[in-house]
Amino acid sequence: MTIVELGALGEFVGSILTLATLAYLAIQVRQNTAQQRREELVSIQDGQNRVIAQLRDPRVFGAYVRTAGDRDPSIEDRGASFSWVVQYLNHFQIVHDSYQSGSLDEESYQLWAGFAVAIIAPVGIRRWWEEEGGRLAFHSEVRTMIDQRLNDPADPPVPLTEMWTQFSPEAWDFASRSANP
């Protein structure tokens, strides 16, 4: 075998090895991307759990339920409930940004978006959102999405206070009266 033939064989083997290396790197990048998406999803869920966990405090929970109803809540209830709503929607902005960047799938995004709208949908919270400028604290894309869903006559949102019995203002009033005879 001549030097030229050995050089050609070396180039051929080198190109095969280069292709194998590129394929290996592509697989590694894909696996790394999938792992990053899983970690981001876990981080989002952890954030959601931290905000939702605040509802274990009866003062926050009661303030939200009383403010959500079509009543005249105290200034303390309004402050506590709107503070919690802002915290939840700040968390949702992260969800929205992750979805927009392509790192969150459609189904997960729709789940969280539906919950965000359900939090805003009760009469008292919606009044704050629409009439008192609550919506102005959030990015325009998030405001637009929530506004569209709140005002969708074909698929009106179910308020959080109607999703589960414990969020019902009537149930909360009964529980409050039972705890404070």
Image (cartoon, rainbow, N blue to C red):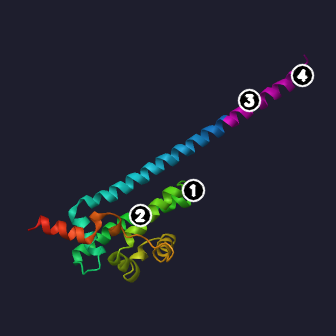
In primary-sequence order, the first of circles 1 and 3 is: 3
Q: What is the three-letter code of the residue carrying label 4?
A: Glu
Query: Residue at label 1?
Result: 102
Segment colored magenta: 1-23
Q: Where, quadrant-wise, is the N terminus in this rendering? A: top right
Disc 1/disc 3 C-alpha distance (Å): 33 Å
Residue 160 percent coordinates (x, y)? 35, 67
Quick one: 178 or 94, which is closer to the camera? 178
Q: Earlier in the sequence, mark 1 or mark 2?
A: 1
Which residue is rendered at x = 33% and y = 59% of the image? 51
Q: Nearer the viewer, mark 3 or mark 4?
A: 3
Q: CA distance from mark 2 to mark 3?
A: 51 Å
Q: Amino acid at mark 1?
A: Gly
Disc 3 on helix, strand or loop? helix
Judging by the rendered image, the residue that carries numbered circle 2 is 115
In the picture provided, is 85 more to the left or to the right than 139? left
CA gap, disc 2 and disc 4: 68 Å
Please name the residue shown 42% across and 69% down the image.
Answer: 117
